[in-house]
Image (spheres, rainbow, N blue to C red):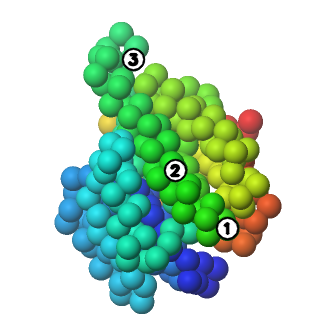
Amino acid sequence: MRLEGKTAIVTGSSRGLGRAIALAIAREGADVLVNFASREEPAKEVAAAIEQLGRRAILHRADVSNGAQARAMVQAAVATFGRVDILVNNAGITLPKGLLETSEAEWDRVLAVNLKSVFLCSQAVAEGMIAQGGGRIINIASTAGQTGSLSGPAYCASKAGVEGLTKSLARAFARHNVLVNAIAPALIDTEILYWRTPEQWKTTLESIPLKRLGDPNDLAEAVVFLASNGGNFVTGATLDVNGGLHMG
């Protein structure tokens, strides 16, 4: 088991990508804090599944775009597990609206959940990771931040920001053995995509060289790689998990 004895926080882990990531990390031996903002029942199911794998699970409600709540979440993980080895900044929302249709409040909310939360949660774990001699921070970006997409300017801007923040943190913390990387998925089969019309789905699938949507486990396995010894010499990178949709 590649993560045996490790502890992790996965933000936004009650469903979709976060759920798959939390379970994959647990299968590899890590104890996991399952974070949710509003969907408690699905989060309970994730925590129960982790415990069935023989690992410890903490269920913690927090809006990770709020600094006090992000810090409290990290403190809860440390209080139970003793340390945090892995932080996966997964929490995110989309807003498939054009520039002229997007309100200032909507813009602010998308940037807060998708980008500010990465800053806040990374800040909350950094001191502990430095003190313990290392750690891994893995940020979920998006192909939308590299190319622009139907997901709207707020979403694209937030995910582009995640990549820039990842590089900055990687340079700052490399000397402390805190490795910071991003993963940029595209078109993973979760409910965040379900707003697309049948015509948009057809165009989407035709544009993917592998001719399929990604499975959440495709992304989760990439997270495990970066969190494990396989990622020991990787920092400041963005791993594209996109079926060939964008080859940058």
- Counting from the top left corner in percent of width and height, residue 35 is at 34, 60
- Which residue corresponds to the image point at 69% horizontal and 51% vertical from the top-left? 173
Mark-to-mark CA distance, 2 and 3: 30 Å
Q: Is residue 64 above or below residue 230?
A: above
Q: Residue 13: where, in percent of width, then height?
A: 37, 60
Query: Is label 2 in contact with label 3 (beta carbons under 8 Å)?
Result: no
The image shows residue 19 at horizontal and vertical percentages of 39, 64
Q: Nearer the viewer, residue 202 or 81?
A: 81
Q: Position of residue 64 (x, y in %)?
A: 36, 48
Q: Earlier in the sequence, mark 1 or mark 2?
A: 2
Whether the residues at callouts 1 and 2 have beta carbons within 8 Å, the answer is no
In the figure, residue 57 lies in which quadrant?
bottom left
Is 44 left or right of 218, judged from the image as shown?
left
Label whose residue precedes the other's in the sequence (3 or 1)? 3
Q: Is residue 167 visible?
A: yes
The answer to whether residue 144 shows anywhere in this view is: no
Please state which of the two labelled residues, at mark 3 or mark 1, is closer to the viewer: 1
- Label 3 crowd (10 A; few <14 / some 14-19 / many >=20): few
Q: Quadrant of the C terminus?
A: top right
Mark 1 belongs to which amino acid? Gly
- Foreground residue among 95 and 215: 95
Q: What is the secondary structure assignment of the residue under circle 2?
A: helix
Three-letter residue code for mark 3: Gly
Residue at x 63%, y 34% (from the top left corner) = 164
Q: CA distance from mark 3 to mark 1?
A: 44 Å
Q: Secondary structure at mark 3?
A: loop
Location of mark 3 (residue): 98
- In terms of sequence position, does the residue under pointer 2 or pointer 3 come before the other? 3
Determine which residue is flagged by label 1. Answer: 133
Along the viewing direction, whichever of 237 and 205 lies nearer the viewer: 237
Tell me the tag on residue 122. Answer: 2
Q: Amino acid at mark 2?
A: Ser
